[in-house]
Image (tube, helix red, strand yellow):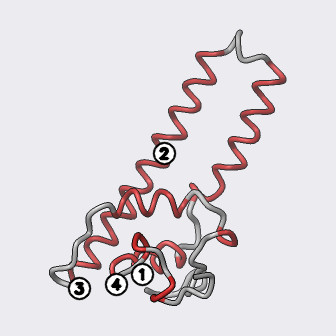
Amino acid sequence: MRRGEEWALPPRDRGQVRALARDYLDSRKLVVSEYIVFVLIALVVLIFTIGAGRNAGLVLNVEVGILAFIGLESLYHASRVARLARQRYPGQSTKGLAWYLAKRSIRLRGSRIPPARVGRGHQV
């Protein structure tokens, strides 16, 4: 599975459309959702520093903003991948693609399983 061989992948990662989605996301030079974990760490430090009770509204708004940003970025990528998949693999299902890309995009590139097959900036 760590080598990305098709027979070893779990069912959620199998198929040409999912492979295309992984390659598309991994080839992007900048996926902001990948670095959200650092923003969340800073938010936790900020909560303990200034106190969550006094600024609960601000913290909640930041958390909702982060979730909305991840969702919008995932929908953008999913629409691009779905268009590519319809051109390259007509008749294949693209169901659940946005959720799949959202889960993959919030992981740092080095910790993604299956690992990236393409480098940053490569054409997919």
Q: Amino acid at mark 4?
A: Gln
Q: Is residue 104 above or below residue 59?
A: below
Of badges 2 and 3, the one in the foreground is: 3
Q: Are marks 4 and 1 in contact (CB under 8 Å)?
A: yes
Residue 63 horizontal/vertical position (percent): 57, 32
Q: Amino acid at mark 2?
A: Phe
* Structural crowding at the residue carrying mark 2, measured as other residues with C-alpha within 10 Å and reported as few (<14), some (14–19) or many (≥20): some
Q: Is residue 107 above or below residue 52?
A: below
Of badges 2 and 4, the one in the foreground is: 4
Q: Are marks 2 and 4 in contact (CB under 8 Å)?
A: no
Of badges 4 and 3, the one in the foreground is: 4
Residue 104 horizontal/vertical position (percent): 52, 64
Q: Secondary structure at mark 1?
A: helix
Q: Are marks 1 and 2 in contact (CB under 8 Å)?
A: no
Give whichever of discs 2 and 3 has the lower sequence position.
2
Residue reaching furthest to the right: 49
In-image side of 106 versus 123 (left or right) = right
Residue marked by disc 3: 89
Q: Are marks 2 and 3 in contact (CB under 8 Å)?
A: no
Residue marked by disc 1: 19
Residue 122 horizontal/vertical position (percent): 53, 87
Give whichever of discs 4 and 3 has the lower sequence position.
4
Front-lying residue, 9 or 94: 9
C-alpha gap between disc 4 and disc 1: 5 Å
Residue marked by disc 4: 16
Q: Are marks 4 and 3 in contact (CB under 8 Å)?
A: yes
Residue marked by disc 2: 69
Q: Secondary structure at mark 4?
A: helix
Q: Is residue 18 above or below residue 65?
A: below
Q: Looking at the rendered structure, which numbered label has been put on residue 100? A: none
Residue reaching furthest to the top: 54
